[in-house]
Image (spheres, rainbow, N blue to C red):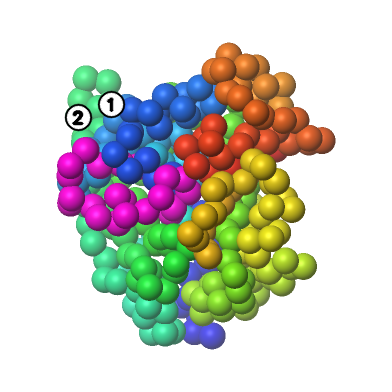
Amino acid sequence: MPSELPVPTLDHVVVNARDRIDDAADTYRRLGFTLTPRGYHTLGSMNHLAMFGTDYLELIAVKPGDDSRPEIMSAPFGLNGLVFGSEDATATHQALEGNGVPIDAPQQFSRPVQIGDATRDAVFRTTRLQNAATPAGRFYFCQHLTRDAVWRDEWRHHANGAVGIARAVIAAEDPRTLGGLFTRMFGPRSVRPTDDGCSLILGLSRFDVVTPAAIWEMFGGAAPDSRGRRDYMAALTIRTLSLDAVETALEAGGVKGWDRIGTSVLVPAPEAFGVTIEFSV
């Protein structure tokens, strides 16, 4: 393996709200998340973020009738983007392209951020895996050129005690295909076989790739609607400081159908805009 392959790190995860950003934001506030003010990308999309210690959850959408981001409106509601960190998007692109990974050239964009009385541009460079190579959803790398405009302490405090993303769970008819892609991206030591598929290790987080049958064994009726989908991003495990805080936030938000099971609280996908959310200590 070339020595310049990137080390896998998690930057953020993306929940697709299509053209219903108001509904998605209301849903995630009722789940106990503090959201950043609405941002508007120069690419045409808009978002809210739930910021954690070193990663974050993004709600993304477009304005009704806007066709500038067809990949958002053509995808279902729910988890549809898993984003790796990069300190240099151009170098990441060159390393992965050189190792046979189908990846698009970097692009730079921004969004204004209101900080106190001032407005700054948060600037990003991304390089994206080609959609045909990742039918489960979008995978890309993000380089932050203005980290201090994104990770701010006033946005990191959540009623549900959330402090980070521990896991994303991906359903795949053949987990070996995505596992092989991850191996080309990061090297074989980053990918571990499991009983149901494989796991990509990203620091203290991981992406589990499992069969659709395993999704139902894990989450039962809390799993997302998989009709018409062979491969899809299904669930997130959010690390929290307190399950009691999670329960209090869910009760205050009127969230339905959640269940406390051992050391986790499970929120069904219909209550989280199409993604199963597991809170765990």
Expressed as whole percent of the image width and height from the top left, the position of residue 61 reads 31, 41
- Depth order, front residue of 231/42: 231
Q: Is residue 43 magenta?
A: no
Q: Is residue 223 left or right of residue 124?
A: right
- Is residue 115 in sight in this rendering? yes
Q: Residue at x 77, y 67 (%)?
A: 195
Q: Position of residue 81 (x, y in %)?
A: 43, 54
- Say few, some or many: other residues with alpha carbon within 10 Å of mark 2 (under 14 / 14 to 19 / 20 or more): few
Q: Is residue 225 above or below residue 115?
A: below
* Foreground pick, 114 / 259: 259
Q: Secondary structure at mark 1?
A: strand
Q: Residue most toward the top?
A: 252
Q: Residue at x 53, y 43 (%)?
A: 275
Quadrant of res 214: bottom right
For numbered disc 2, what is the local secondary structure? strand
Residue behind mark 1: 115
Please, is residue 126 above or below residue 181 in the view? above
Residue 104 marker: none
Tag 2 and tag 1, C-beta contact below 8 Å: yes
Q: Between 121 and 258, which is closer to the camera in this rendering?
A: 258
Query: Can residue 249 be seen?
Result: no
- Residue for point 42% across, 74% down: 133
Q: Residue at x 41, y 41 (%)?
A: 58
When the figure is inspected, residue 24 is found, relative to residue 79, above or below; the finding is above
Q: Amino acid at mark 2?
A: Thr
Magenta residues (range): 60-81
Tell me the amino acid under the disc marked 1. Answer: Ile
Q: Which mark is residue 119?
A: 2
Which residue lies most toward the right here?
262
Residue 89 lies in quadrant: bottom left
